[in-house]
Amino acid sequence: MSEKEEKVIVRKATINLRRKYGRTKQINVVERDAFIPKNLELEIKESILKKKSILATDIALKFDIRVSTAKILLKQYEEEGLIKLFDPTLKLKIYVPAS
């Protein structure tokens, strides 16, 4: 098997929406790949262990992946014991590194 460089697929587009009275509004649409390449996953794991608190949205913005994919990855890391949920009663899931 030859090792090929895996890339994350990101498509960006700008849409012009027509508003009232001839005004237009531009919206940026970003379509991201649902899968994480192995090299990027290792980089995410290293950065997670250095942080004090971890949110799925922070990871998604930093590494340009989907939020849903980041949530799945964080849940997987929680099951492995790398991170733990800060407060299970909160609606917003905040993770901290397991010590």
Image (spheres, rainbow, N blue to C red):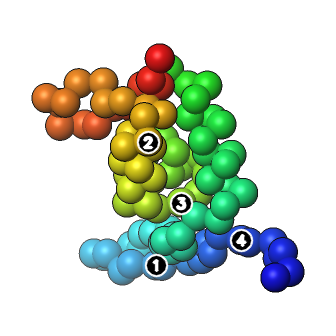
Kindly identify the amino acid type of the residue bearing the numbered disc 2: Glu
Given this view, does label 4 or label 2 mark the residue nearer the observer?
Answer: 2
The percent coordinates of residue 14 (x first, y second) are: 54, 75
Q: Which mark is residue 65?
A: 3
Q: CA distance from mark 3 to mark 4?
A: 11 Å
Tell me the residue that label 2 is attached to. Answer: 80
Q: Secondary structure at mark 1?
A: strand
Q: Secondary structure at mark 4?
A: loop
The residue sitting at 42% across, 74% down in the picture is: 24
Query: For residue 49, which quarter of the picture?
Result: top right
Q: Secondary structure at mark 3?
A: loop
The percent coordinates of residue 59 (x first, y second) are: 52, 45
Tell me the residue that label 1 is attached to. Answer: 16
Density class for disc 4 (Cα within 10 Å; few <14, some 14-19, many ≥20) is few
User: Quick check: 40 above or below 59?
Assistant: below
As drawn, is 86 to the left or to the right of 23?
A: left
Foreground pick, 72 / 57: 72
Kindly identify the amino acid type of the residue bearing the numbered disc 3: Ile
Given this view, does label 2 or label 1 mark the residue nearer the observer?
Answer: 2
Of the image marks 4 and 2, the number of the one nearer the N terminus:
4
